[in-house]
Amino acid sequence: MNILSANYILTPHELLENLSVAFDKTIVKIAPIEELLLEFPDANVTTLKENSLLMPGLINAHVHLEFSANKTALSYGDFMNWLYSVIENRESLMNDCDTECIKKAIDAMLESGITTFGAISSHGLDLEACENAPQNVLFFNELIGSQATMADALFGDFLSRLDASKSIKREGFHTGIAIHSPYSVHPVLVKKALGIAKNENLKLTAHFMESQAERDWLDTSEGDFKEFFETLLKQKSSVSGSAEFLEYFNGFQTLFTHVTKANESEFETLASNKHTVIHCPISNRLLGNGTLPLQTLNEKNIPWIVATDGLSSNYKLDLFEEMKIALFMHSNTPLLELATALIKGVTIHAAHALGLNTGEIASGRNADMIVLDLDAKPNDELAIHLILKRYNVSKIYINGVLKKG
């Protein structure tokens, strides 16, 4: 048994003061230090420094690690320009990012307080690094391919990668399925993958309505994607409509990423099926895709969380930075209200969306915790200061094991 004695403990609903946490792999009890010492006299006690804040480890639910070698190779400002630059540089970027490169990205996430992440894996090149990562990992094997003639080969490759990830049994590693997007995955493949997800109770995620090009292509088979699909894939029309695509996920609580170009009907469908939206504000800005309408999500009670996306559309994998950008991006939302929602969007709400027993400091939850060194006693605007000040993360615990500090 271990005991952490902190000045302050952040829970989803309140800030606790001068209490301590007893834990092993999970949090056993939160109480005054004297009470815990009576109950656990042989516990290892750590007294944190003055103005220490114990809070849940951060959860990055959507990150692409296979492009972590990118620095300045890709074009920003417009989605289609970015996409063409990805295609042009894909081979060199992937060749330049071996397991050690991916490990550095994972370690950078850990340093910034990320104790759990959802890896969207297109080729399985990140599997070894994720297997050996100190963090909890939800490994989403991505399915992509809109050409019917290639469906069997693509699905075979997907199954091979899925089986490889399912063979990993270490604590904190979970397997999931990612459907790339409605424009890039043939309905036959979507249905097959969803059948596996249902039979094996695997978590699901998908990109949805990220760009105007996607909006136009799915609605009318026109727009900026028209030349792309006709030239590269010999397709003259979309393989799926947006409503049809969303209907496949009825009964599956899914995490849909971006959703910046969704319409009223699609938001209603997301709400009625209790799906979660993953907000990646930096990626949306860099690719010129607009801003997620948080007010609409809140009005329709659609859960939303925050993630970094990958280094192909971001400059760092840091959720504190992501929240800061979001705080300024959504300028019409009351500041403290937004900051509080953002903190929950990388802790308790993200844990709920991923179906994981973590994301809060509470008895029975996994002991995934970080310690921040505050510079003064916190006040009622703590959520704002946590995002703006970027306090030092001095200790990190994952499943009760000290990973830093």
Image (cartoon, rainbow, N blue to C red):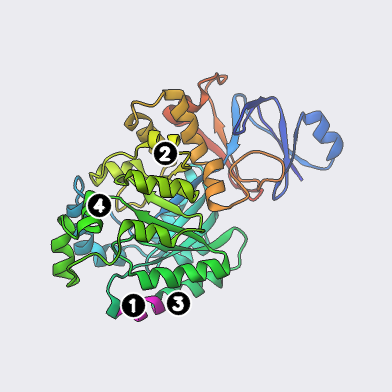
Looking at marks 4 and 2 on the same chain, the residue that comes earlier in the sequence is marked by 4
Magenta span: 150-156
Q: Is residue 353 left or right of residue 16?
A: left
Residues packed near mark 4 inside 10 Å, few (<14), some (14 to 19) or many (20 plus): many
Q: Contact, CB < 8 Å: mark 4 with mark 2?
A: no
Closer-to-camera residue (242/101): 242
Q: Contact, CB < 8 Å: mark 2 with mark 3?
A: no
> Circle 4 — which element?
helix
Q: Magenta stretch: residue 28 in it? A: no
Which residue corresponds to mark 2? 297
Q: Amino acid at mark 3?
A: Ser
Estimate the spatial distance between the alpha carbons at disc 3 and disc 4, rounded to whole Å: 32 Å
- Give the label on residue 215, or none: 4
Pick the quarter of the image with the C terminus: top right
Q: Quadrant of residue 170?
A: bottom right
> Circle 1 — which element?
helix
Which residue corresponds to mark 1? 151
Of badges 2 and 1, nearer the viewer stands 2
Of badges 1 and 4, nearer the viewer stands 4
Q: Magenta stretch: residue 155 in it? A: yes
Q: Amino acid at mark 1?
A: Ala
Estimate the spatial distance between the alpha carbons at disc 2 and disc 3, rounded to whole Å: 37 Å
Q: Amino acid at mark 2?
A: Leu
